[in-house]
Every structure is written in C-alpha cells, then in structure tokens.
Amino acid sequence: MMRFNDRKEAGQLLSLELARYKDGRDVLVLALPRGGVPVAHEIASVLHCPLDVLVVRKLGVPGHEEMAMGAIATGGIRLINPDIVSALGISPEAVEDVERKEEAELFRRERSYRGNRGPLDTRNKTIILVDDGIATGATMQAAIASLRQRRVRKIIVASPVAPRSVVLSLRRVADDVVTMLNPEDFGGVGRWYEDFSQTSDEEVQQLLEADHEVSLTTHLHEN
C-alpha cells in the first residue's frame, strides 16, 4: 500500500475525493487538532470552504496511553468503552483522573486555537470532519456526538487512512465516511506517513489564522 509523504500531501489527495463539496456555501471544514489541522487546511483551501477546529481528547488507558478507553469533546460529550475498561480492570477513579487531565487540556487547546472567535456556528451546515488518521474511532465518535447536539445538516468524516472495520462502524453514526487507505494491519497512523512529525500549537494557530484571513478577504470581495 502507498504511504503519504506528509499531512499536506494527504490533504491535497483527500480533497480530490471531496470535490463534490467545492464552493458549497453551507459547507464547513472542521479539523481535529493537532494532526488533523494541516490535512483540513489543504481540503478547505481546495474546496474554498471555511476552516475551524473541533477539540476532542482521547482518554488513554493508564500506562498505555496510545490505547483509547474513551474520549471527550466540546459540549460536555463523554464516551467510555466499557469493554476495554472492564477487560483491563481500570477503576472508576483511574478513569476520572484521566478525564480530569484531558478536560483541562481540552479547555487549554480551545483557548489557544480559537482565541476570541465566537462559538462554532454549525446549524444547518454540512460538516467535513477531518483527522490525519483514525485508529479506533473513539475520538471521531466523540466529535460526531458533539456535532449532533448542534443541529448540523450532515456530517462527512474525512481521513486519509482508517481500518475498514472502523470505517464501517463510523458509517453507522456519520452521513458519509471518505478515506483512501483502509488497511486492517493498521499498526498506528504514523505508519502510513513518511513524515509524521508532531504538529505544534504554533502551526495550528498559523494555519487557522491564514484561513481566517482568506475567508475575510473572500467575504469582502463578495460584498
């Protein structure tokens, strides 16, 4: 199977699969930070759609943080996988400790990335929800649940890579799922990128600011 050079290339290629949404006046591209933002930035640029972020935090298993036992998202969304919690014997207190830490990070990222921007206006919009890869689907499930509270018209999950089984499960809760690679021998998102270096807070802020300036310029020209 192919590998992507980096998140920028992945976003450019994924945008081709989303061409039908180009210039849609009701379309909003939402990225899951941090890694989803460079991918979503390319998609928003090609589709001529505004870009914003939806902050979601994975709840990692204590001692094995790369494994998700649940996720939280903006709007008080909390999803826990009872099978994993039970199988690993994770106590309610341990779950609460992880959730408390991730909630603090969620609020920090919202302040850092969105600054003084007003609340997300997603009513009656088609949302393209983007991440750089989907391993278990826990964070994406939380993001979808958060958006369903906001009276959106449609949710399109878009990711360069995700296991086929995860895609099938996400199709039960999203209106569509658009991916390019669906390996069952997944081995982690980073395996499918040549360059999977960490996306910094500064890069997220710069990409969001660049998109915001383009959106303002476009709005002025249209009026």
Image (spheres, grey):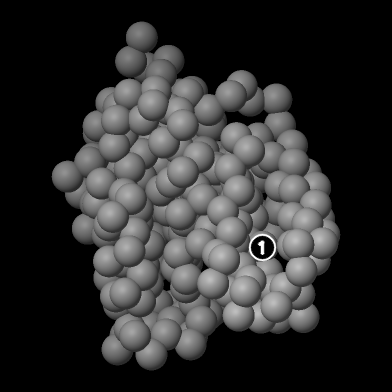
User: How many numbered discs?
Assistant: 1
Query: Is residue 119 something that shows in the picture?
Result: yes
Tag 1 residue: 59
Where 69 sits versus 88, above or below? above
Question: Hey, which quadrant is residue 96 in on the image?
Answer: bottom right
How crowded pointer 1 is (Cα within 10 Å; few <14, some 14-19, many 20+) is rated as many
* Drawn side of residue 179 relative to residue 189, left or right: left
| Residue found 33% across the figure and 24% down from its top | 124
| Residue found 47% across the figure and 73% down from its top | 135
Question: Hey, which quadrant is residue 22 in on the image?
Answer: top left
Question: Residue 13 versus residue 73: which sits nearer the camera?
Answer: 73
Where residue 186 appears, x then y in whole percent? Answer: 42, 85
* Drawn side of residue 139 relative to residue 67, left or right: left
Instruction: Give the farthest residue toward the top.
Output: 223
Question: Residue 33 versus residue 101: which sits nearer the camera?
Answer: 101
Where residue 178 appears, x then y in whole percent? Answer: 27, 59
Where 163 sits versus 172, above or below? below
Under tag 1, what secondary structure? strand
| Residue found 68% across the figure and 69% down from its top | 60
Question: Residue 199 versus residue 85: which sits nearer the camera?
Answer: 85
Question: Hey, which quadrant is residue 13 in on the image?
Answer: bottom left
Looking at the picture, which amino acid does disc 1 mark? Leu
Where residue 223 appears, x then y in whole percent? Answer: 36, 9
Query: Which of the image's four quarters has the N terminus?
Result: bottom left
Where residue 123 appears, x then y in whole percent? Answer: 39, 23
Question: Residue 104 versus residue 6: which sits nearer the camera?
Answer: 104
Query: Is residue 8 something that shows in the picture?
Result: no
| Residue found 47% across the figure and 56% down from its top | 140
